[in-house]
Image (cartoon, grey):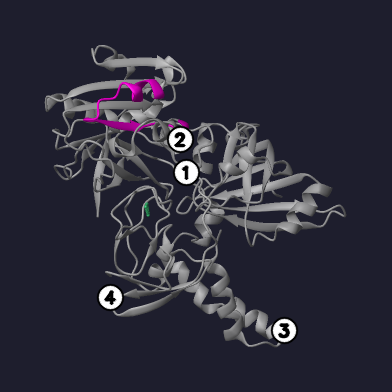
Amino acid sequence: MLGEPGEVIKAKVRTRIDSHFHRFIAHSPFLCLATTDAAGYADCSPRGDYPGFVKVLDEHTLAIPDRLGNKLADSFTNIADNPGVGLIFLVPGHRETLRVNGTAYATDEPDVLARMQVEGKRPVLATIVEVREAFMHCGRAVVRSRLWHAESQALAEEVPSLGQIVADQLALDAAAVDADLEAAYKVLY
Amino acid sequence: MSQTTLLERVEPVARDVLALTLRGRHGPLAPWQPGAHIDLSLPNWLQRQYSLCGDPADPDRYRIAVRREPLSRGGSEYVHLFLREGRELTVSLPRNNFPLVPAPSYLFVAGGIGITPILPMLRAATALGAATSLVYTGRAADTMPFAQELASRHDTRIGVGRADLTALAADLDPSTLVYCCGPEAMLAAAEDAFPAGQLHVERFRPRTWQFPANRPFELVLARSGLTLPVSQDEPVLDVLDRAGAGVPAGCREGVCGTCEVTVLEGTPEHRDEVGGAADRLYPCVSRALSDRLVLDL
Ligand code: FES
């Protein structure tokens, strides 16, 4: 029912970060990181920063900075229990996405953290990903979703703010929650 | 203010060093004097400062040299791996924190990539008829850009390892000005060895200083009449931005001088490396010692 991926697509699965994949990562400001815990429950969390915030240490190794607000604890506990991770990198305006699967661990190696300094601040920790496979994922999902169309941004207006959502859930004052959130977003590093 | 250029040429000039030639996209580029640098805006949103090392008499081109840093945060690595000839690049107007002051003779001291601002200075000083000498050192011969073309000059000493700056200082004529650019260890040694009145240094990276703890103060913008509180955690640059009175910024580390503003009243706490006049403030890093600081904004 699902069909087999075509030969051409299959051939593109690599076991290393080649120069094209490196270029993709160097221009990607956003990715999703999937992990699972010891019991097999999955978690997926977004990471984002300036393009190239994920460093390619060598063709088999990536480093992702862990900064404020990344909900560090979940991913780290999961990685400690089960090192398998899946990543999807996005480049704004690009139809295809880059997928990387591998195993991960946390590090505080100063030379790795030094490369991730932004506005004079280093992340506390980085997630190192040892690449098992890497491949470009076809662009149908991005094309169908009109993800990068400017008009698509209007969708956000139809969705309540996080303040409203949390306020409803916890019976709080939405404006106060939104104001706290805006203040928190000012400190990005 | 920015200028649009085309990356005309990329060529290796030493191990891990590329020279970039940028041509004005819409005619001549802003003129510059030896010692000047530009901010280069990279496609990955990073901005980096590079000294101009080409010929100031060529109105159409800037030339810079970029060393790939082993611990690159994404600037030099991007230049080395991803920039291709023919692409458009935005650069700032040239700024000069390291100008050549007229003197009868000059001693230039350069370490590694620090040769870049020195190169046009050396040519200009020679053209003006001043007596010049250059001491140029590096970690290994193949890491030193432009060493070959400099080796043919009679006034140049090129070597691997550390220059003996104390010996140079002992022989220094009081009318000679010393210009030094290189790694932090060399700059610190130069500051120890040479009399402050004769020495000019150029830093690309800020030193690590210990500053007293940040304290809050009040910022007054004289022209717009705004009064803004500056909390202890916020850089003045961000406070200005938020108030809609933002100033352009480059390095955000107090080295490039892009964010310069004039202080009208109050005592600034200079934390920058630009070394501008006492009434100039670089709000990306600098703060105030007084409780109130009035800016010409
Ligand atoms: S932005 Fe470079 S000195 Fe302030």
Q: Residue at x 64, y 40 (%)?
A: A110
The span from disc 4 to disc 2 (Cα, nearest Å) is: 38 Å
The residue that disc 3 covers is: A170
Residue placed farthest to the right in the image? A39
Q: Crowding near pointer 1: few (<14 within 10 Å), some, many (20+)?
A: few
Which part of the image, by quadrant, shows the N terminus of chain B? bottom left
Residue A46 location (% of width, % of height): 63, 58
Q: Check contact, mark 3 vs mark 2: CB within 8 A.
A: no
Disc 2: which chain?
B
Circles 2, 1 touching at the beta carbon (< 8 Å): yes
CA gap, disc 3 and disc 2 = 54 Å
Q: Which residues are magenta?
A: B166-185
**Pointer 4: residues within 10 angstroms few (<14), some, or many (20+)?**
some
- Residue B207 is labelled as 1
Mark 3 and 4 residues: CB-CB less than 8 Å, in contact? Answer: no
**Residue at x 36% of width, y 52% of height:** B250
Residue B180 position, x and y percent, is: 34, 32
User: The residue under label 2 is which amino acid type?
Assistant: Glu
Q: Point out which mark residue A103 bears.
A: none
Discs 3 and 4 carry the same chain letter: no
Q: Position of residue B139 (x, y in %)?
A: 47, 20
